[in-house]
Image (cartoon, helix red, strand yellow):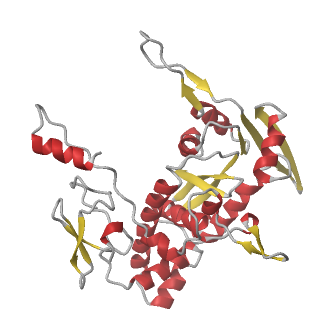
Amino acid sequence: MNPQAIFCPNMDCPARGQSGRGNIGIHSQQEQRYVCTVCRQTFTTTKGTIFYRLRTEPETIMTVITLLGYGCPTQAIVKAFGLDERTVRDWAQRAGRHCQAVHALTVGQSRLDLGQVQADEIKAKVLGGYVWMALAMMVSTRLWLGGALSAHRDLGLIAALVAQVRAIALCRPLLVAVDGLASYVTAFRAAFRSPLPRRRGESGRPRLIAWPNIAIVQVVKQRSGERLDIQRRIVQGAKELIPRLIQVSQGHGGINTAFIERLNATFRQRLDPLARRTRTLARKADTVTAGMYLVGCLYNFCDPHHSLRVKLSVGSHGYHWVQRTPAIAAGLTDHIWSPAELFACKVPPPRWEPPKQRGRPSQATLRLIEQWCS
């Protein structure tokens, strides 16, 4: 037990989410519990992980969720481990919510020079109908940037996805490759704008100016009989900018959406409701969302990608290949995560803010604010 690496999870504690501040002590070695000296609350080591308040051994839970994340059918897990189907479903929901928090902490709060982004949608089967899942990825690192779900394939779905990409992207030259859905063009043009600084005396909403060097291309596929016609359109951006961004981000080739289609295949293989022909339907959209984040985090942090490996010279005549995951290639981590490390990762809560009150705060309150908010 290492108190220096632990933070207080109590949402009412001024020291919540802060590690290495000396406020965490060991309450019980036998029960694996810590204590916070600020709020006087005790908590177990599994607080903030998917294993919290579960009686089953963590190794069994981790094995089951890993199998789910790599496409093993639920019925096979139920038969192999002697579990109830509702238990497996609850563990999958826990893992999905946990992976969503990890994704928001790592990928969602990063700032990256994306270079080229590809996006696409998949239809998922749920009880009583369908939902649409939109995904986006960074081509150069194969990093899954995020996803969104909606009952309709419309502008609202695409805008939710583009907002996640916009939060990560640095204002650099960017190539966006999508299919023929017009909502992509509308959403990217609206999202990739920045407000101009206001002049003195001006009021109202500031004027938004579009980011420079944003290129949008579309790959439209139409099948007539056995023939497949592919049209490549340049919707926005200079023609000389597009080959340069393609060269930097993918190395060779032309305008395509092959990388996001390959990622779609990975999600279809590992998430049952996304399979083209399947009887495994999700009961509700939340199940698909949980599965999306589970598969996405395993893909980003735990799966080495063959095209991302680098050659490392050893001695004067030898070399070996160093495997990398998309998260390593994007600079989000320095090693390949194991599923156990992903599921045990603790996401700190937001920093504590003092409650709003009328009048002048007391000296004790001012000292407390200065100590834990500095």
Q: Residue furthest front?
A: 316
**Toward the viewer: 48 or 92?**
48
Q: Residue furthest top?
A: 201
In the rendered image, the vertical position of residue 244 relative to residue 83, given as above or below: above
Is residue 33 at all visible to an observer of this figure? yes
Q: Which quadrant is the N terminus positioned in?
A: bottom left
Q: Residue at x 45, y 71 (%)?
A: 343
Q: Which quadrant is the C terminus positioned in?
A: top left
Residue 316 appears in which quarter of the rendering?
Answer: bottom right
**Toward the viewer: 20 or 56?**
20
Residue 110 coordinates in the image, percent (x, y): 53, 50
Residue 121 coordinates in the image, percent (x, y): 64, 52
Residue 124 coordinates in the image, percent (x, y): 58, 60
Q: Is residue 222 left or right of residue 327?
A: right
Q: Residue at x 54, y 40 (%)?
A: 156
Residue 55 coordinates in the image, percent (x, y): 31, 83
**Toward the viewer: 228 or 257?**
257
**Toward the viewer: 135 or 369?**
369
Residue 302 appears in which quarter of the rendering?
Answer: bottom right
In the rendered image, the vertical position of residue 243 relative to residue 83, given as above or below: above
Q: Is residue 267 left or right of residue 106?
A: right
In the rendered image, the vertical position of residue 116 relative to residue 182, given as above or below: below
In the rendered image, the vertical position of residue 261 relative to residue 213, given as above or below: below
